[in-house]
Image: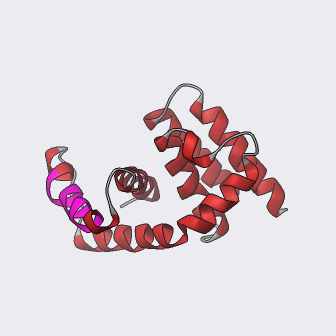
Amino acid sequence: MTRRELRKHLVRLLYLKEFHEADDIEEQNQLYFDVLLPNEGINIDEDGKENLIQVYGKIVNLLPEIDQILSSEMLKWNIKRIGIVERNILRLSTYEIRYEQLPEPVVINEAVELAKEFAGEQSPGFINGVLAQIVKKRS
C-alpha cells in the first residue's frame, strides 16, 4: 500500500469514528475492511491492514493532544465546528508532522490533495493555512 493510499484509508476510518460510540468502533472498522472495501473493489493484504490499524490506533490515542495543537492554531475556529472531513485531514496531517516527523511540505501537499478529493471547494486553502501555522510554530 502506498503512503497516499494509507492516508486515504486513515481519513476514512477517522471519519467513520466520528459517528460511532467507542464500543462500536472495532465492529465498524471490521465492516470497513470486510464489506465496504470489497464492495469498492479494494483489496488490502494482511500486512497493509495491520499497518493501517496500527497507525490508526496511534492517531486515536493521540487525538486529545492533536486536537489541542489544532485548537491552538485555529484561534477563530472551534475544532468541533469545522467539517468532519477537514477535521480528520488536519488530525492526520498534524500527527504526521508532529509525531512521525515526515517532511512538512510533503504532508501539507498530501493534505491539500486529500481535501481536493474528499472535502469542499474552500477546504484545500483552509487546510494549507492551518498546517502552515503548525509548521511555522515548530520552526
30 within the magenta span: yes
Colour scheme:
secondary structure
Residue 81, image x and y in percent? 57, 40
Q: Is residue 127 above or below residue 9?
A: above
* Magenta segment boundaries in residue numbering: 25-35
Q: Relative to 34, is 73 on the left or the right?
A: right
Total number of numbered discs in the rendering: 0
Identify the residue at image location x=43%, y=52%. Answer: 11
Q: Measuring 26% from the left and 61% from the top, which residue is drawn there? A: 29
Instruction: Specify the farthest residue to the top.
Output: 121
Q: Is residue 79 above or below residue 63?
A: above
Residue 56 pos. (x, y %): 42, 67
Q: Which residue appears at 62% of the width and 68% of the height?
A: 65
Observer-nearest of 79 and 9: 79
Residue 103 in sight = no
- Name which quarter of the figure residue 45 lies in: bottom left
Query: In screen coordinates, is 87 left or right of 45?
Result: right
Can residue 86 be seen by looking at this rendering?
yes
Q: Quadrant of residue 139?
A: bottom right
| Quarter the N terminus occupies | bottom left
Residue 1 sits inside the magenta stretch:
no
Above/below status of 98 relative to 109: below
Which residue is depicted at the point 63% across and 41% down?
Answer: 127
User: Where residue 117 sits: x, y (%)?
Assistant: 45, 35
Q: Main secondary structure of the magenta part?
A: helix
Q: Position of residue 99 (x, y in %)?
A: 62, 71
